[in-house]
Structures are given as C-alpha cells and as structure tokens.
Amino acid sequence: MKNAIKSIIGGQNTADIFKYVMANLYMHGPTSITDLEILSYLALYRPEEFKLHEIPILNYMAVFYKPTTRDTLAEVIFTQYRQYIRDTYSYTLTPVQADIIKGINGNACFSFSAPTSTGKSFVFRKQIEESQNDVVVVVPSRALINEYYLELSEQIKDQSVNILTFIDKINTRYAKRSIFIVTPERCRELFKQREQFKVDLFLFDEAQLSDEDSKRGLYFDSIVRRCQKAYPEAKFIFAHPFVQNPESQIEKNHFELQTANAKQYIQKNVGQLFLCQNPDGQFSHFGIDQQIMGHKKTIAGFDPLSATIQKGGTVLIYTSKQKIYNGNFWRNSPNTWRYAMNYHLKRFPNT
C-alpha cells in the first residue's frame, strides 16, 4: 500500500484499505501505530464507510468494554474471548487489562510499561478498592495526586476508608483503612509512623527510572527500598508510560526474581493524526511510515484548531513559561491560535 492518506482523502481504493487494516488487526491486534493512524483517517474522511466496519474493528481490537454484535465466525471467537475474561475476573476487560491483573495477582512485584489509553487506571482503581488494608499510591506530581483523589473519591463511597493526600493516622474511630496518594517526597512521612499502618499494596504510577544525572530518580529509588524494608509483605506495582525496560525496577531495587515479573505492552487503543502548518497558513497531513502513508504532505483542507474549538473540544498548546510571561507566545503564534483564543473569549468572556 502506498499514499494511504491521499487515497483516503480522495476516496480511492478505500475498500482495499479497510481490508488491509482489518487483516492486520485480526492477525496481530492493535500493535501498529500506522494501522491506527489509517483508521483515524478513515473515521475522519470516510465516516459512512467506517460505520459499516466499526463493529468488527472494535472486536478485532478487543475493545471488550464497548457493546458489540457478532456477524462472522471471527467475531464470535472474540466474543467468546470477552466472555472468558468476564467469567474469570468478573469485569469486562480488554486482554491487556486482564493480563495486567494476572501479573499483579501472580507476583509480589510486577513492573510493566503500557501506552496511554490501555486502561491501566481502571485496573488500578479496582485493585485499590478491593484491597483489605492500607494502600500507598506514589505519583510524580501534584496534578496526578489531584486526579487520583477525585477519581477514587467518586468511586469509593465507603466512609470507613480514608482517602488522603498526606500521610497521617486520622479518623481512627470510624476508618478501617487508608489510601494515601503522595509524591515520593511526601511518602517519606510514612516511615515515621510505619507501625501504625498495615500496607498491602504500593502502587508507583508513572514510575521513574533513575540515572546518575537524575537526583529525583535516585531519591525515588531510595523511597522504594525503604518501603521494601518497612513493609516486606506488601505487593509492589510499577507502571511506566513509555519504556522498553520495565524489568529495571526489579533489578536495581533488588526484588526477589522468583516472585517478580516485568512486561512491556505494545497494544494501543488510540490512533493519531499528524498535521503541520504551511507558510501560507494551510494545514497538511503527513504520515509516520512514509512507505505506506506517503512521502509528500497532503493538504488537509481544514483548520484543525478552529474546527476543534467550534465543536466544543479542547486544544492543548505547549510553550515555555517565559514566552507566556513576556507575551511572545501570542506575538509569534499562528493566526489559528489567535482565532482559537478569540473564539473562546467570545464564548467565555470572564475567563
């Protein structure tokens, strides 16, 4: 296949493109960035055709939490797979989610890497909710602390469970256990009161891999080792976003190899479109795999920023703090940034 972007936008050979992608999904699962990239273009430019193939695509991607029907023998096989996972774990999970739970339940230490949107947050929340004793969640930033706190507060309505963003023994008259959501720096307070807690689970989300130039990474390792020493019976889980060596957490922190395991998951659930702005202000598509997507840029014919804003979506623009303070982000920004900001201010004049 060549020039997939141009063919999809022009409506050429789309039936063959669908067959190509669906065959890959059936044989290998959603492991290819390019396959999901093609699906994203098909969904954007050929929505009516995409709708006809949507159910088998969801089945072949094993997105089992979405309700689907079955029309072919291949889809029946995936439906049976979904039912097996539900019977085993009592939840409708994807195969990656099921395998993560298997790794957690079968090891004292499980370290894994998985792309964004693989559903690890759902698995973690269930593990935290079903734990019988105290749980410590260690995350690298206050933003993630707030995210975990809001999600767990919404999910866990049991008043006998403390959900705290600091380490302390409070509400002892009613609370049976506590869930602590802290940064590595705040986690050190745990050791001052270690006799007062019975920690079953340490969950290190967005875990950091240290090197000799990373002071915070080295501090992170010291916290892990102190947790091991203070609570040798606890279970340790390390979740990494994009690393190829999740086993390093096991090796460098000296976990018992017989009761530890590591795994890198390459399955993906989200496709991406890549665009750039030309000197004339127009936007063009380009593909990661040029052999399949095309060697030349293809005019998009629309402004993705203004289109997103008009549909009520969100546009994230990354820039430095210095450019925000001195105003350069605005003076040097494309016209579409200004359009997006002006559109937002018209709708929300008080922001």
Image: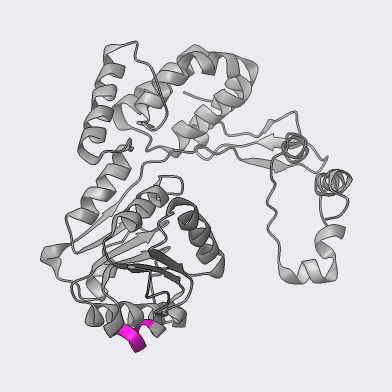
* Residue at the (38%, 60%) spot, across then down: 240
The location of residue 266, given as percent across then percent down, is 35, 45
* Residue at the (41%, 26%) spot, across then down: 58
Q: What stretch is highlighted in magenta?
A: 190-194
The location of residue 257, given as percent across then percent down, is 14, 67
In this rendering, does residue 113 appear at all?
no
Q: Nearer the viewer, residue 136 or 184?
A: 136
Q: Quadrant of residue 223?
A: bottom left
* Residue at the (45%, 31%) spot, across then down: 35
Residue 191, magenta (yes or no): yes
The location of residue 51, given as percent across then percent down, is 53, 17
Q: Which of 85 and 170 is in front in this view?
A: 170
Give the farthest residue toward the front.
Answer: 173
The location of residue 141, given as percent across then percent down, is 52, 69
Looking at the rendering, in which quadrant would you find the C terminus?
Answer: bottom right
* Residue at the (52%, 36%) spot, across then down: 290
The colour scheme used here is one colour
Residue 14, magenta (yes or no): no
